[in-house]
C-alpha cells in the first residue's frame, strides 16, 4: 500500500465541450475509513457521458458537482482496509467512489465482484450500471416482442451494445447506428446485430433506415438524439416504443437546439416515448445482475472495454467519449 493518494478535482465549469482546464490532479495522504467503511485500492474507474451534466450549475437527475469537488464515479478494486464485518481485506468490490488511487466506500453501498465470471472492468460495464441500464431500458421501457425491429443509436457504446444483444436474445431484428466501420463490423460480426449503419458515412439517415429496416421501427433505444433520432421518428410503426436513455449529441450544447418539430410524427403510429433512469430500478438490481452474469458466463452476451492506462489520463478518457474514441465501455486502469 502506498503512502500517498492521487485524486482528481473539478476546478472549472466548462463552456461547451470540456477540456483539460476543468481538471486538477493533486497528491494527498491516503484516507482513513470510518466505521462501516472500506478503503479500496482502485483497479479501474469508470468515465460516463452523464458526468457532463454534473459539470453544469443546474439541477438534473444527477447532483451537480461544485467547483472544488473531488470527481466521482464507478470504481472496482481491492479492499485494503475494512471497518465492516461484511468484507475483508483482499475482497474485490465495486461501487461509487472517486477518481483516485484509493477511495473510501460505504460497505452497505458496494457489491462483491466475482473474477471467475468476468474480468474486473466488466463490472463497470456489462455487469455494472450500463448493463443494468440496457436491461431495464429495453425490457421494461422498450417492451420488445419477437419479430420486432429494434434500432439502437450509440450502439457500439457500453449501453447500446448490450441493448442490441438482449434484443437478439428476445427474437428481435436489431439495427445499430455507430460512428465508424470498425464499430459497425464489431456489431454485426461479433455481437450478432442484423445490420449496422456508420452514421459518419451517410448524409441521409432516412434512406439508410429504409435499407436496413425496410419494415419500419418497433422499438427505438436512443442514446444519442440529434438527426439520427429525427430520422427514426419518421419510420416508427404502429404502437412503437421509444426509450430515451441519453442525448450525447446535445450534452455540450450551450443553448437548446431547435429544428423541425417531430412530435406530430408520434400521432399516427400512437408511439410511446419514455425517458429512463436506471436508479428507478434499484430494488430490482439483483435480478438484472443475475441474468446479465448468466448471459456473460454462457457467452450469450459479449462485451468489450476500451482501457485507458493510468489515473493521470482519466480526463482524456472522459473527453474521448465525446469524440467516439471508445468501443464498448470506456474505463481507466489505475492499478493492476
Image (tube, rainbow, N blue to C red):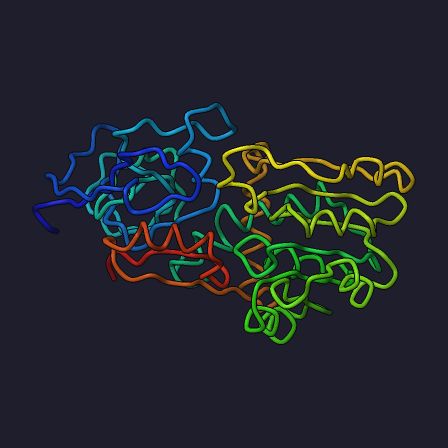
- Name the image quarter holding residue 108: top left
Q: Report x, y in % for residue 76.
A: 34, 50
What is the quadrant of residue 265 in the picture? top right
Q: Residue furthest top?
A: 59
The C terminus sits in image quarter: bottom left
Where residue 186 appears, as percent x and y from the top left, is: 58, 72
8 on left or right of 250: left
Residue furthest out toward the left: 3
Tell me which residue sits at (33%, 56%) in the image.
Answer: 332
**Above/below status of 110 relative to 228:** above
Kindly identify the residue that appears in the image at 66 percent across and 59 percent down: 164
Q: Is residue 181 left or right of residue 8?
A: right
Does residue 53 appear left or right of residue 277 in this picture?
A: left
Residue 158 in view here: yes
Is 253 in front, or is 42?
Answer: 253
Left-right relation of 250 to 95? right
Res. 85 in view: no
- Residue 274 at what x, y percent from top left? 71, 35
Q: Position of residue 328 (x, y in %)?
A: 50, 61
- In the image shown, does 219 or 145 lie closer to the viewer? 219
**Residue found at x 42% / y 30%:** 56
Q: So how many labels did they put on this image?
A: 0
Q: Is residue 326 above or below residue 275?
A: below
Q: Residue at x 42, y 44 (%)?
A: 17
In this picture, is 314 found above or below 242?
below
Between 226 and 135, the one lying in front of the other is 226
Amino acid at each position: 500500500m502506498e503512502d500517498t493518494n492521487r485524486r482528481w478535482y473539478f476546478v472549472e465549469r466548462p463552456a461547451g465541450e470540456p477540456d483539460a482546464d476543468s481538471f486538477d490532479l493533486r497528491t494527498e495522504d491516503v484516507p482513513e475509513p470510518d466505521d462501516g467503511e472500506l478503503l479500496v485500492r482502485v483497479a479501474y474507474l469508470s468515465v460516463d457521458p452523464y458526468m457532463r451534466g454534473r459539470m453544469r450549475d443546474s439541477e438534473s437527475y444527477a447532483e451537480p458537482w461544485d467547483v472544488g469537488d473531488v470527481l466521482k464515479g464507478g470504481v472496482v478494486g481491492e479492499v485494503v482496509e475494512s471497518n465492516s464485518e461484511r468484507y475483508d481485506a483482499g475482497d474485490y468490490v465495486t461501487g461509487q467512489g472517486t477518481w483516485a488511487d484509493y477511495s473510501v466506500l460505504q460497505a452497505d453501498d458496494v457489491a462483491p465482484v466475482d473474477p471467475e465470471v468476468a474480468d474486473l472492468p466488466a463490472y463497470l460495464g456489462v455487469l455494472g450500471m450500463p448493463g443494468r441500464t440496457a436491461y431495464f431500458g429495453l425490457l421494461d421501457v422498450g417492451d420488445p416482442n419477437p419479430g420486432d425491429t429494434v434500432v439502437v443509436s450509440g450502439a457500439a457504446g457500453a449501453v447500446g451494445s448490450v441493448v442490441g444483444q438482449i434484443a437478439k436474445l428476445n427474437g428481435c431484428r436489431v439495427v445499430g447506428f455507430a460512428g465508424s466501420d470498425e464499430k459497425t463490423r464489431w456489431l454485426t460480426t461479433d455481437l450478432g446485430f442484423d445490420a449496422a449503419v456508420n452514421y459518419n458515412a451517410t448524409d441521409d439517415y432516412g434512406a439508410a433506415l429504409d435499407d436496413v429496416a425496410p419494415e419500419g421501427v418497433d422499438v427505438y433505444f436512443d442514446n444519442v438524439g440529434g438527426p439520427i433520432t429525427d430520422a427514426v421518428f419518421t419510420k416508427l410503426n404502429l404502437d412503437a416504443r421509444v426509450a430515451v436513455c441519453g442525448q450525447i449529441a446535445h450534452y455540450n450544447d450551450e443553448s437548446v437546439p431547435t429544428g423541425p418539430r417531430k412530435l406530430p410524427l408520434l400521432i399516427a403510429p400512437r408511439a410511446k416515448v419514455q425517458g429512463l433512469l436506471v436508479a428507478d430500478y434499484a430494488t430490482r438490481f439483483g435480478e438484472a445482475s443475475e441474468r446479465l452474469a448468466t448471459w456473460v458466463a454462457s457467452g450469450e452476451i459479449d462485451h468489450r472495454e476500451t482501457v485507458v492506462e493510468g489515473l493521470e489520463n482519466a480526463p482524456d478518457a472522459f473527453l474521448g467519449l465525446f469524440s467516439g474514441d471508445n468501443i464498448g465501455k470506456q474505463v481507466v486502469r489505475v492499478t493492476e
